[in-house]
Image (spheres, coloured by chain):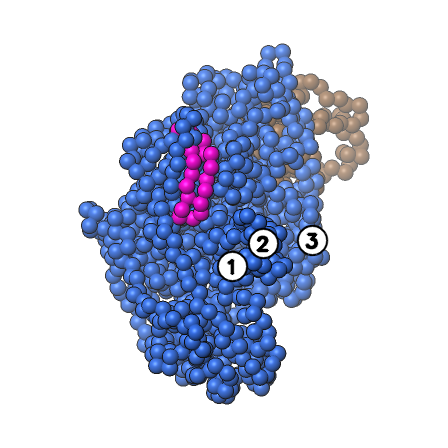
Amino acid sequence: MTAENKVGAVLVVGGGIAGMQSSLDLANSGFKVYLLDSSPGIGGTMAQLDKTFPTNDCSMCIMAPKLVDVGRHPNIELITYSEVESVEGEAGDFKVKIRKKARYVDVEKCTGCGVCAKECPIDAVSVFNEGLSERRAIYLMYPQAVPLAFAIDREKCIGCGLCENLCLADAIVYDDKDELSEINVGSIILCPGFEEFDSDQKGEYGHGRFPNVVSSIEFERILSASGPYKSHVLRASDGKQPKKIAWVQCVGSRDLGCGADYCSSVCCTYAIKEAVIAKEHVPSIEPTIFFMDMRTFGKGFESYYNRAKDEYGVRFLRCRISEIKEDPETHDLTIQYETEDGQLIEEEFDMAVLSVGFTSKEDSRDLAGRMGIDLNERGFCQTQEECPVETSRDGVFVCGAFSGPKDIPETVMEASGAAAKASGLISEARNTMVERKALPPELDVTGVGPRIGVFICHCGINIGGYVDVPGLVDYARGLPGVVYAEDNLYTCSQDTQKRFVETIQENHLNRVIVASCTPRTHEPLFQATIREAGLNAHLFEMANIRDQCSWVHMDDRSTATEKARDLVRMAIAKASIIEPLPMVELDITQSALVVGGGLSGMISALAIAEQGYPVDLIEAQSELGGVMRRIHHSSEGMDVQGFLRDTIGKVDSNPLITVHSNSQIIDIDGYIGNYRTTVEQDSDQIEIEHGVVIVATGAVESKPEEYLFGEDERVVTQLDLEGMMAEGADLSGKTIAMIQCVGSREEHRPYCSRVCCTDAVKNALAIKEAHPDANVYVLYRDMRTYGFKETLYERARAEGVIFIRYSLDRKPTVAKGKDGLVVGTRDHILDMDLEIEADLVVLAPAIIPQPGNADIGKLLKVPLNEDGFFLEAHVKLRPVDFSTEGVFLAGMAHSPKFIGEAIAQAYAAASRACTIISSDKFETEATVSSVNEALCSGCGLCAAACPYLAIELVDGKAVVTTALCKGCGVCAATCRSGAVQQKGFKDEQILSLIKGALCEVL
Amino acid sequence: MATETEGGCQDSADKHIVVSGKLIDELEGLCEEDVFGCYQCGTCAAGCPFMDEMDLTVDEVLRYVILDKKEVLESKTIWLCASCFACAERCPRDINITKIMEALRQIVLRQNIDETDLECLTDEEKRSIPQMAFVSLFRKNIG
């Protein structure tokens, strides 16, 4: 494959959060994206969730902006309700056959008004609400669905023709047929997701038989405002509010009986979340979580667990449940469990939630077969630790739960990582498949009085049926400044938008108002249209007469109309004093600076270089490699040192990468696209110009302060043990006691270090394999071998490694004995003291942040969390970004993690960085804030309040860095002297709205 | 856990159960189950219909074996097991615990220890214990 033949487009299969993130990264880096989903809309599982852990953010609220971005991105083409038939060709040039299933609704014409579904006489089960409620035969997946277009369920539809008659947009296509088409792409990303375990298979829990036993995803829908009970927590049997709810963990996970030899990674934390949210909904609810090991290993999860216990009063009981019984009269449930001291208790509950695990989808397995991708024995996509986003086929990449159970942030990291790999392969073809629309120059409106055009939308009968739209048009015509007004059946339809441009030009309009639905979904569309007509996009106002008039006052036409008049009058009042807001274009230095030459830093640097941009890699030590230099074998069998040597070799020989070893960063100046960094190397100072920064400073192993560490040389750390074994230490016949959580999950350091459980199991297995006669004891608190790492734990048990659980209030003791070391602990099952005569005690010390993080954080103006690790912009959806634009995060600087996870995150950071440096220009927001120096008293309140660090005090006056400002308006709200104003939302403009609301005559 | 007897009859040392080598080896030889695979999750105990009567919980029995504690052979639990297979059916590690219980009983039975000392039975016991029970008992001991 020569560079010229590569196709600058990528197919992304699966429109969940992973597919959306990959698509946005690619589309923003100059590649065309086809985003395919088998359902009628994108959104995936995340759209079904109520809240997300550990921040309790509303899932839909944080996801909706991404949905909208994807839906309207000029470089992303949505192919919904479709399947991949076949893939031919090779990496760089694939030909993909796609079957578009008959949807019976024309997506281009459907405006999503919903009149069809309102009148459809046929009920069907809502799959989105997990069967807990009904929908019609013609349906929209969920209210915020993208594309906002209906589909007909032909298995249910009786073909009565009502919808066809009602649809004024003429969107119903009864004789729709499957269509085959072919697209040409350079690479492919697979992210079809997972399926929840079907809990009906565990008959003993009664799901499907007992109405008050629900699965966790069903419970998410019950909690959700768009769910079957409109966010009221109710029992299905009698519609009453439950008091005692039990969560049963590991349903379809860690269960050989269901063929699941793995842990589903997320259920412990999501059960805690559901318990906490249920309690927030109804404080009288008493939640109990029955668990085996509490696997809250992620960033911030352990403190979430502690909060649930201590602040919310969630009861945690360590016992796996054998069965759930039901009283057939009351439908109350009985659960029998064993307490930790061996007592058997029978307890009644009003409801039980089964925490179902992840399984692979049959459709995805078929897809893998058609594409020639290897699956593992569990039906998930087979990946390698060296690059967790690569499949077995060249040019085909994977992210999200298709390659194994994982949570949202990791999915998002992998999604960006897969985008980096998919675009790296075709980087030569960047910008070859994307179109830039040529726009006419902007009309100068200075000094010209307002000529306002008002467009009022019927939205079929969605608005028109409840508001007197023609009357509203007449009313608008009579208001000052209005020179044109019309009503449209659908203002947003393509033909209306074409006429829109002509109308603006013919009537010399210089302000445009649309009274229709919500600006959240439609403002960008209208703004783009008026820009095509030669107007600045901000000479636009919108009145939401659908949500606020026809929807809330649907029984009262005159009130709805009156309110619509108020809203339109307000918009007109403001429109006369709005100004064009220029988009500022900044130049971008198309290169990156990577701080930290460990594994993550090196992988990020290589990935950016692969995209064709120069990288400066700063390393404090004399050699590259970081903490990985001390790791010898991985849990997945990787030759760590060999891989490290390879990677260092690639970095050293890459002409685009400049390595600065023994170097310290002295100063960082500038902002996104334009950084100037001073680096000191052997007392020489150099200055580097770059557009973005990746922070990959890593983490370190803490030095234990207990268990005779440092006092007895037979007490070592897991990393020491690896070194000893690599040097061929003879442990034959020896007794080795491993102690977990040394300095982790304690009051002074509450987080879990994530990797130590698997590390201990990995080393225990290595010992047993080399010396079967060695005795290995692992003293642990919760065994957190999540995901497929569970199989290692199972193997270690089968090999005869003895696991003894201890609790924080009864920590093990280590003392010097006659010959060996005596490790004292208490057996958790038998409740009796045990003494182990050990030849070697191996500690698993906490992983702690680099001590230098605070300095780097100050230089870059990026925050650390309470544990000293860097704090990302958003823990769920922006896991590798900082809230300061242009700065990204990779590897253990973020939190402790495994090699494969660090690699995925390093690729992700590279992908995010390339969305900026792949263009030589950067457009700032137009609705930024500005400071009137004459009024500014220099109090600094605005600078302190700005979440994006875009305001600084210079010579006693607030100065806004426009490139960093996101236009949130916090500064304007805090300013006491009115010096800070947000463009587009100036005080006088807001006041004009209020005046418009209160005065009948403008 | 020592077997209690009445009427002045004492345990004699020769009645103790002897396991040559590791209990686990002997057990796994008999039942071919992976005892070490046990998670100690408690499912078996939570679902056992006779737990109330048992001196050791089911997961405790497995823990004794893992830690090579031979006292387990003197527990009432292994004899109270009704072989209902509830534990085996629901074990997430797919361990057939019922088979392990049987193997533990076999280990004891193969010692040919006769715990019945008819002279130690009280008149009340002789009257109240059904005749079938005596027949079964003698049969068990003759193998």
Most frequent secondary structure within the magenta stretch: strand
Task: State how far apart marks 1 and 3 are (Cα).
Answer: 47 Å
Name the residue carrying label 2: A942
Q: Residue at horizontal 44%, vertical 45%?
A: A670
Amino acid type for the residue under numbered disc 3: Glu
Q: Which chain is blue?
A: A
Question: Which residue is tagged 3?
Answer: A286
Residue sitting nearer the eye, A437 or A1000: A1000
Which region shows up in magenta? A661-679
The brown-coloured chain is labelled B
Q: What residue type is labelled 2?
A: Cys
Q: How crowded is mark 2: few (under 14 residues within 10 Å), some or many (20 or more)?
A: many
The reply to whether callout 3 and callout 2 are in contact (CB within 8 Å) is no
The image shows residue A923, relative to residue B38, as above or below, that is below
Label 3 Cα crowd, 10 Å radius (few <14 / some 14-19 / many 20+): many
Corner quadrant of residue A563: bottom right
Figure quadrant of residue A507: bottom left
